[in-house]
Image (spheres, grey):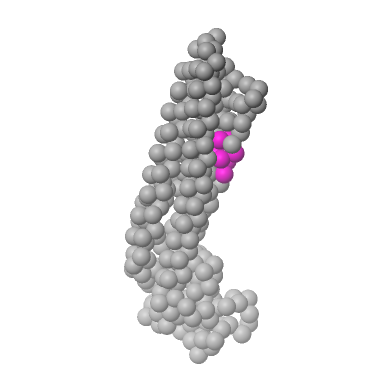
Amino acid sequence: MHQSSMGQTISDPHRAAGAGLAYVGHYVIKSFGSFDSLIQNKSTLIPAAIIIGISAVMFFVGIVGCCSTLRESKCGLSFFFLIIMLIFAAEVTALVFSFIYRSKINGQLERPIRDSLSKYNGEKNSETEAVDSMQTLLKCCGVKNYTDWTNTTYFSTNKTLPLSCCKNSSSPQCNGKLEEWQQFNTEGCEPNLEKFIQDVLTYAMLVVVAFAIIKFFGMVSVCAITCKSRRNGYEPLYA
């Protein structure tokens, strides 16, 4: 294989993988950001932070890998191999954190959701917007079910449920009154939010596994180039 093609073969997948991981990290943070005040354990964002850090390093790795293979530098190839191994270790770490927090999220959402419902006042503030966003996006109402709202200050004051509980908030038939419960999403938000977070973390885990496989083949490619150079008895000019 021509040296320039060899360099491109190694560097291009890493730069593409870096872009892919950056998107995944951004997606995880953005997904959690919609429910920021409802997720008290901010450590669930650690896997996303690791993924974004890995993506930044991988752009650098693509450049180093290209230069090293073009020059067949022993030092450069060794450095490239070391970086790939460190990235592989970081991906495994992100995978472990995702697995841990995916299991720990069970049962941790009820209290913050109830606290948010108790602070809900229908005005434009972080608590109200978080609850409305959660109920609209996840098509749910209350914690366990829609009747949880009857124990809140908002319901005592207004005698209605928030319009974000409506199946169709723009429908004039849904006015928030409890007797019109057929117009509401009756399922509670706790199980829906829990499933949403677990699905996001599962997606991140699957992507990290896929890119970890790419790193493995990257290490194999570097080893193959190094072994070929040694078999040919070639002494690199820039080593």
User: Is 18 within the magenta?
Assistant: yes
Badge count = 0
Residue found at the very far bottom of the displayed protein: 179
Residue 136, image quadrant: bottom right
Q: Of residues 200 and 114, which is closer to you in this image?
A: 200
- Residue 113 seen in this snapshot: yes
Let me know if residue 146 is in the magenta part: no
226, 5: nearer the viewer: 226
- Picture coordinates of residue 223, whole percent (x, y): 49, 27
For the point 59% across and 36% down, which residue is it?
Answer: 13
Query: Would residue 83 appear left or right of 65 to someone viewing this image?
Result: left
The percent coordinates of residue 172 (x first, y second) are 63, 82
Quarter placement of the N terminus: top right
Q: Determine whether 171 is above or below 41 in the image.
A: below
Image coordinates of residue 175 in percent, x first then y, are: 56, 83
Q: Position of residue 56 (x, y in %)?
A: 51, 36
Q: Nearer the viewer, residue 213 or 159?
A: 213
Q: Residue lying furthest front in this view?
A: 231
Q: Residue at x 45, y 80 (%)?
A: 146
Who is closer to the viewer here, 123 or 79? Answer: 79
Q: Which residues are magenta?
A: 14-20
Q: For residue 7, what is the image quadrant?
A: top right
Residue 184 vertical placement versus 1 (above, below): below
Residue at the spot 53% in from the left edge and 52% down from the top edge: 27
Specify whether residue 149 is in view. no
Identify which residue is drawn at 42% across, 83% down: 147
Instruction: Give the vertical position of 66 relative to 165 (above or below).
Output: above
- Majority secondary structure of magenta residues: helix
